[in-house]
Image (spheres, rainbow, N blue to C red):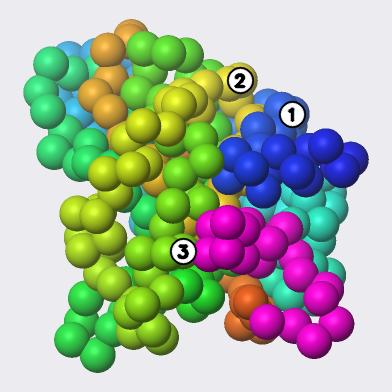
Amino acid sequence: MDQSQIEQFINDGFLRIDNAFPEELAEQGRAILWKDTGCDPDKPSSWTQPVIRLGDYNQEPFRRAANAPTLVDAFDQLVGIGRWLPRGSLGTFPIRFPSPNDPGDTGWHAEASFQGADGSWRLNVTSTGRALLLLFLFSDVGVNDAPTRILAGSHLDVPKLLEPAGANGLSFIELAQRLDNSFERPMTLATGKAGTVYICHPFLIHAAQPHRGTSPRFMAQPPLLPATPLQLYRQNGSYSPVETAIRRGLFS
């Protein structure tokens, strides 16, 4: 990536990487996922649920997609060399099907990254447990195919909400209840061809939406885990773009 792309990530909170992994890997991955849905790809009558969530997948197509060279380079540039953990799998797949029914999970939020002492899933200002949010498109996703909605720049609103809560942070529900300013941010849809990846700041506010198209949407949404905790006060000033964005949100 060049400096303009890095600055775009800091300002907008995400980057779209086209052709991040080969389309044939996406096709191989879909074949595995279709079997686990219990649905028939050739019989829409079998698509009876608006969303089916499948667990972690570590088969070769998913491992290769997660470690595509373009993505590895991007992780080094955005998080820092040696500051993130390679993935051996991809996380949950929320597979969305064309449906008139409300999927029940379309609220605006940032992803929680660690479990608190009370069992709630939480976020804090140093993003304990998450260096990036990644959206891997394993099918072509158009505007009617339930693309993830993204509020560009919303990650800059989050640090000032989290900082007073200290290391314990806020639950993702508590944070979602305080996002009024973020709703004024411009909305982007995570569309693209199979093989596209959206690299997102861990604080980026986003939301699902109902599927109004004709073909199911296959997408993985794993975290990139940190190898070392994010630091917002480095003596040498060697901040990663992820850290720089948090600092910009805190001090601007």
* Amino acid beneath label 1: Asn
| Up-down relation of residue 247 to residue 207 (above or below) | below
The answer to whether marks 3 and 2 mark residues whose Cβ atoms lie closer than 8 Å is: no
Q: How many marks?
A: 3
| Up-down relation of residue 232 to residue 17 (above or below) | below
Residue 96 located left or right of residue 200: left
Residue hosting label 3: 159
Q: Residue at x 33, y 43 (%)?
A: 181
Q: Position of residue 97 (x, y in %)?
A: 27, 24
The mark lying in front, picked from 3 and 2, is 3
Among the two numbered marks 3 and 2 on one chain, the one whose residue lies closer to the N terminus: 3
Q: Disc 3 and disc 2: Cα gap in Å?
A: 32 Å
Closest to the observer, 106 or 126 = 126
The N terminus lies in quadrant: top right
Q: Quadrant of residue 15?
A: top right
Q: Quadrant of residue 164?
A: bottom left
Closest to the observer, 86 or 122 = 122
Residue farthest along the right direction in this orientation: 2
Q: Which residues are magenta?
A: 233-252
Q: Residue at x 60, y 25 (%)?
A: 194
The circle drawn on residue 193 is 2
Residue hosting label 1: 19
Closest to the observer, 226 or 181 = 181
Q: Position of residue 47 (x, y in %)?
A: 21, 23
Q: Give yes or no for residue 242 being in the magenta stretch.
A: yes
